[in-house]
Image (cartoon, grey):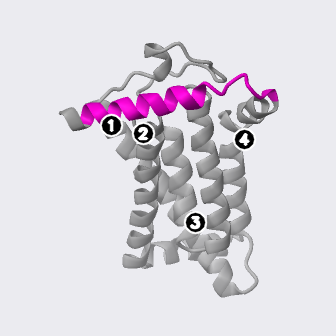
Amino acid sequence: MEYLQVITKIDKDAFLWLNGWVGQYPWVDGLIRLVVSDYLVPLLLALALLGLWFTGETMTARTRNQYGVICAVMALVLANVAVEVLNGIFFRPRPFASFKVSLLFYRPTDSSFPANPAAVAFAVATAVWMWNRKVGAVLIALAVLYSFSRVYAGVFYPLDVLGGGAIGAGAGVMAAWLIRRFRVIPKAILRVARRVYLA
């Protein structure tokens, strides 16, 4: 019990320290406002998946990229189910419900833990990384920036995004394992997509 109290205190202190930087450097706040939005990073992730689906120097590379996209979609489903289940079991109030914070974002009403945006971003990034290291590394960096921005902007504690990120990464690894274990399913998806000129 004392162990949990220590972790919670460190988590809250880290949040307050990081959020305390809001207003110190307006250009940083402007950048965070752009990154933290519900649109920029999800759009970039979607465009990355679309680009992967239709690219590859060889048919083998293209097929690997397409497996990465299928894996990312599967990981998204797994991550969202995990977050939904955890939200039904446990509710953690947002930081702004307990502290006076400098908000750079609107006030979400769902549970602070685990951070769903982090889970989504890391699910896609990890799933892609399992099939394409270069693109996956870029997406992981984007997921880290996205998660950081959510803490800086005042809507999540650090442990919330770490938990969400772990769930997303786990979903990406699990999806890759399932695709490799049951390769007949992605093969069938690609076969149908290629017949109608969508792959």
Secondary structure of residue under mark 2 = helix
Name the quadrant of the C terminus.
bottom right
Q: Residue at x 33, y 26 (%)?
A: 91
- Between the residue at mark 3 and the residue at mark 4, the CA separation in whole angstroms equals 19 Å
The first of marks 2 and 3 along the sequence is 3
Secondary structure of residue under mark 1 = helix
For label 1, the residue is 7
Point out the stretch of residues depicted in magenta: 4-26
For label 2, the residue is 159
- Between the residue at mark 4 and the residue at mark 1, the CA separation in whole angstroms equals 32 Å
Sort mark 1 into few (<14), some (14-19) or many (20+) by Cα contacts within 10 Å.
Answer: few
Q: Main secondary structure of the magenta part?
A: helix
Name the amino acid type tagged 3. Val
Name the amino acid type tagged 1. Ile
Sort mark 3 into few (<14), some (14-19) or many (20+) by Cα contacts within 10 Å.
Answer: many
Q: Is residue 187 above or below residue 85?
A: below
For label 4, the residue is 40
Q: How many marks?
A: 4
The first of marks 1 and 3 along the sequence is 1
